Image (spheres, rainbow, N blue to C red):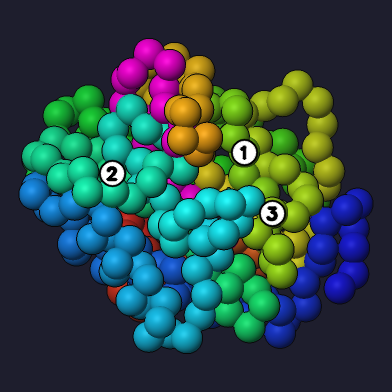
């Protein structure tokens, strides 16, 4: 694989594999979204994820990664990312962020969405909407020749204009044969220029947005990141290929994008 400033540049075959891995991830997220309802334990979502991995004959990418003990990250309400599936029962009004990854023929698919459990508050709806929109605003900056940090700048600008916060402690990343490749993809403007984007780069863009302060802390389980102020957070992620004809979202399910109008 050709390398450009530390980033692996993928050829067409490699991008096809990434597309397939991400199609599976997106299909799994669709199924998880269908399952979410008041009264179900979040472990049920883990089972859906594992069952579909078995059906697809793929490996969950997160299970065992740096010791992570599940296939799925399921982060509820003030949990931002890396929440553990458990016997916890979802209740009406919960905000449920689900992050999934698989390895297909040596290539990693990685995508996340936040789901409403039943009817949620207006604040939660607004948070989810702004976070999802910010992801697409970032994706539109993923064009050949543009500065990598234009992605985070656009996301931050939009999120803050809506009165929400962008988490700094976790960032997006290059994605390919490894889940985390160079470069880091911040969801905020880090104060310096980034690298110019080139065709064949594949990156995961994943804004984590908070209702209150963007400060997070990690719980004693060593994984679950929660907002310090206990307020709600949301997380959306797409894996995207940089192509001469613009950004190509790889994590699209057989149903299509949840909100296709956001890509127009
Ligand atoms: N989408 C997350 C990431 O890109 C998922 C990683 S969870 C882990 O970092 F457990 F695998 F680390
Ligand atoms: Co990711």
Left or right of 157 in this view: 89:
left
Magenta-span inclusion, residue 76:
no
Say which element carries label 2: strand
Give the residue number, with chain letter if any, for mark 2: 96
Foreground label between 3 and 1:
3
Asked if the residue at label 3 sits under 8 Å from ligand 1, the reply is yes
Say which element carries label 3: loop
Left or right of 128 in this view: 263:
right
Q: Nearer the viewer, residue 61 or 148?
A: 61
Q: Nearer the viewer, residue 198 or 77?
A: 77
Q: Is residue 124 above or below residue 22?
A: above
Q: Which residue shows up at 71% across the image and 79% down it? A: 14
Q: Which residue shows up at 35% across the image and 41% down it? A: 75
Count neighbours of disc 1 (C-alpha within 10 A) and say few if under 14, some if 14 to 19, many if 20 or more: some
Give the residue number, with chain letter if any, for mark 1: 171
Q: Which residue shows up at 83% across the image and 56% down it? A: 7
Give the residue number, with chain letter if any, for mark 3: 180
Q: Is residue 107 visible?
A: yes
**Mark 2 → mark 1, Cα distance in angstroms:** 19 Å
Q: How many numbered discs, if any? A: 3
């Amino acid at each position: 694989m050709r390398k450009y400033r530390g980033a692996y540049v993928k050829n067409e075959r490699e991008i096809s594999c990434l597309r397939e891995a991400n199609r599976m991830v997106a299909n799994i997220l669709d199924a998880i979204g269908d399952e979410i309802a008041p009264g179900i334990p979040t472990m049920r979502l883990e089972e859906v994820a594992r069952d579909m991995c078995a059906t697809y004959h793929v490996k969950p990418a997160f299970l065992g990664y740096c010791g992570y003990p599940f296939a799925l990250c399921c982060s509820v309400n003030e949990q931002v990312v890396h929440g553990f599936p458990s016997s916890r029962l979802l209740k009406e009004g919960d905000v449920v962020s689900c992050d999934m990854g698989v390895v297909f023929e040596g290539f990693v698919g990685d995508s996340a969405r936040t789901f409403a459990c039943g009817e949620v508050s207006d604040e939660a709806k607004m948070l989810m909407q702004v976070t999802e929109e910010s992801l697409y605003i970032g994706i539109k900056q993923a064009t050949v020749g543009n500065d990598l940090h234009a992605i985070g700048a656009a996301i931050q600008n939009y999120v803050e204009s809506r009165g929400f916060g962008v988490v700094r402690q976790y960032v997006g990343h290059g994605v390919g044969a490894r889940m985390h490749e160079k470069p880091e993809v911040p969801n905020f403007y880090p104060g310096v220029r980034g690298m110019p984007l080139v065709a064949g780069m594949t990156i995961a863009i994943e804004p984590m947005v908070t209702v209150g302060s963007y400060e997070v802390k990690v719980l004693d389980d060593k994984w679950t990141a929660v907002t310090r102020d206990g307020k709600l957070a949301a997380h959306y992620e797409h894996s995207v290929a940089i192509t001469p004809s613009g950004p190509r979202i790889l994590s699209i399910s057989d149903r299509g994008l949840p909100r296709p109008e956001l890509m127009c």
